[in-house]
Structures are given as structure tokens and as C-alpha cells.
Image (cartoon, rainbow, N blue to C red):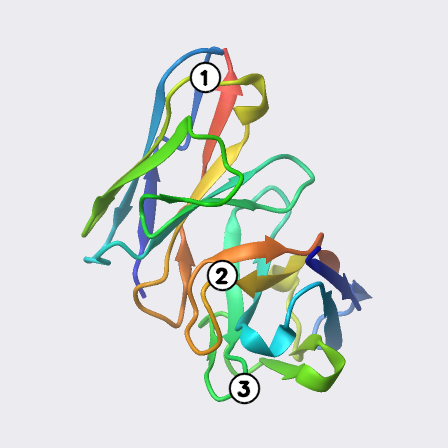
């Protein structure tokens, strides 16, 4: 059974940093690209970042480019999101998600974690 | 970035109804489109990918169609468990991957 378990969320002041982690199990982690998707309270889904199997291809939403860094450790079956210079508008539930199709391209998402809540407020 | 526009943003329907949700891309995306269902407090669930391919385990009352810029998600006979919010997502061009704004299906 595929499981994605996020951690690292919490309350943080504007301008500070936070690192999210996602522990993956139930599939061959390094066979798939991975994503972070967020959802602000009461709002829709926003793709944040994606990474190919070997970290050779990485993409970001314009809203986080230059502030967030996605990474993965295939030996630990883990995905990360380093978030710097956080803003109030980054407040959201952050989902770790597995790509359906494969390793090198970003496509649709077939499994999602339950999310970790990030609140940016003074 | 490719903009995805869903319509309507919400509507009410009754169990047994046939419902259709529309998603329009700001430029052609071939068939690189997915549909998700999200219930309150839950993570999204993949329903359809490649515009019309049903994800494993998804009931056959769900169907998708379209290509280029215009797409539809149809629920042939609405069930009580189908009341939820639905999102489309393009994966033709990235970054960024982009989602539509969502369509909430409520009970009439």
C-alpha cells in the first residue's frame, strides 16, 4: 500500500524558514517523480514544485521560485521542501504527492499524503 | 503559464442526475489533462487522466472527454458519495503544472 506521510509543518513567523519532509513507502520511490502541492484554507489546489527521480529535472511555481527548494533522498525514500523567506500567503496545507507516470516527467498525481499545515503569522 | 478555467464554480444537483463539469485551457494541451475529486478534509483523488482514461478503481459512471482546449467531466448518475469538489489539471507544459479553480457539486 502506497503511503506518503508529511511532517515538519507548524506556526512560523514571516521571513523565517521551515523544512517539510515526506516519508514514502509501498512503492519503488526512485522510479517516480514527486510533487508538493498546497491548498490554502478554503481555497483550491496549487502546485508548488516537482522533482524527477534523480533530481535532474526540477520545477517551481512562480510564487515560490527563489524561496523554496525541493529535494529528495532516494536512499531514505524521502522528499523534502525547504521553505525560506516565508510569507503570510504561504499559509496552507502542504501535500506530498506521487506522480502517476514515471521517473523523468511531471504529469498527473495518483497518490497524495494527508498534508502538513504551515501557518505563517506573527 | 497555462491557465485552466472551470465552469461552473459550483452548482446543486440531485442524486441520479447526469452532471457535466467543463474545463478550458488557455492554450492547447492535447489530451494532457487529469481530473480529481476532493471531499472535505481529505486529500484529492485521481479520477481520470489523459483526458478520458479512468483511473483504476474509479466507478464507470465517471467519464472524461475533450482535447486541445476544451474538456468535460461527466458523472452519468450522481450518487451521494459524489458530492465533492472537482479539479482539472494540465500537465502539457510545465513548470508550472496548473489546476483549475474547482467545481463544487452540492446536494439540491
> Looking at the image, which is closer to me, A50 or A4?
A4
Question: Mark 3: which secondary structure?
Answer: loop
User: Is label 1 on the same chain as label 2?
Assistant: no
Instruction: Name which residue lies at 62% across and 55% down.
Output: A112
Badge 1 density bin: few <14, some 14–19, many ≥20, Cα 10 Å: few
Q: Is residue B92 above or below residue B23?
A: below
**Residue B78 higher or lower than A82, as above or below:** above
Residue bearing mark 1: B12
Mark 1 and mark 2 in contact? Answer it, CB < 8 Å: no
**Residue A66 visible from this viewpoint:** yes
Measured Cα–Cα span from mark 1 to mark 2 = 32 Å
* Cα–Cα gap, marks 1 and 3: 44 Å
Task: Decide which of tag 3 and tag 2 comes sooner along the chain.
Answer: 3
Q: Estimate how packed mark 2 is, as few (under 14), some (14 to 19) or many (20 or more) residues with alpha carbons within 10 Å.
A: some
**In the rendered picture of this protein, how many numbered marks are placed on residues?**
3
Residue B60's place in the image compared with A60, above or below, is above
Q: Name the element at disc 2.
A: loop
| Residue B13, picture quadrant | top left
Q: Mark 3 or 2, which is nearer the eye?
A: 2
Which residue was labeled with disc 3? A55
Q: Is residue B98 left or right of residue A70?
A: left
Q: For mark 2, what is the residue?
A: A100
- Dot in front, 1 or 2: 2
Residue drawn at the location 46% of the way across and 45% of the way down: B55
Is A64 or A23 nearer to us in this picture? A23
Image quadrant occupied by the N terminus of chain B = bottom left
Image position, residue B52 (x, y; %): 32, 43
Image disc number at residue A1: none
Can residue A121 be seen at all in this image of the molecule? Answer: no
Look at the numbered disc 1 and give the secondary structure of its residue: strand
- Depth check, front residue: B49 or A13: B49
Query: Does A37 sit left or right of A114 as displayed?
Result: left
Amino acid at each position: 500500500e502506497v503511503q506518503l506521510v508529511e511532517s515538519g509543518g507548524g506556526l512560523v513567523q514571516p521571513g523565517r524558514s521551515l523544512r517539510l519532509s515526506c516519508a514514502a513507502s509501498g512503492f519503488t520511490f526512485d522510479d517516480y517523480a514527486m510533487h508538493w502541492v498546497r491548498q490554502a484554507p478554503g481555497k483550491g489546489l496549487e502546485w508548488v514544485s516537482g522533482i524527477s527521480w534523480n533530481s535532474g529535472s526540477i520545477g517551481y511555481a512562480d510564487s515560490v521560485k527563489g524561496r523554496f527548494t525541493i529535494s529528495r533522498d532516494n536512499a531514505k525514500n524521502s522528499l523534502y521542501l525547504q521553505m525560506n523567506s516565508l510569507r503570510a500567503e504561504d499559509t496552507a496545507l502542504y501535500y506530498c504527492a506521487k506522480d502517476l507516470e514515471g521517473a523523468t516527467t511531471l504529469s498527473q498525481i495518483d497518490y497524495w499524503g494527508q498534508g502538513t499545515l504551515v501557518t505563517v503569522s506573527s | 503559464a497555462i491557465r485552466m478555467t472551470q465552469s461552473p464554480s459550483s452548482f446543486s444537483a440531485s442524486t441520479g442526475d447526469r452532471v457535466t463539469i467543463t474545463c478550458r485551457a488557455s492554450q492547447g494541451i492535447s489530451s494532457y489533462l487529469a481530473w480529481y475529486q476532493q471531499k472535505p478534509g481529505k486529500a484529492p483523488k485521481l479520477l481520470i487522466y489523459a483526458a478520458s482514461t479512468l483511473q483504476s478503481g474509479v466507478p464507470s459512471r465517471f467519464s472524461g472527454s475533450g482535447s486541445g482546449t476544451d474538456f468535460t467531466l461527466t458523472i452519468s448518475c450522481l450518487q451521494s458519495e459524489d458530492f465533492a469538489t472537482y479539479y482539472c489539471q494540465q500537465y502539457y507544459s510545465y513548470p508550472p503544472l496548473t489546476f483549475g479553480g474547482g467545481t463544487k457539486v452540492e446536494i439540491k
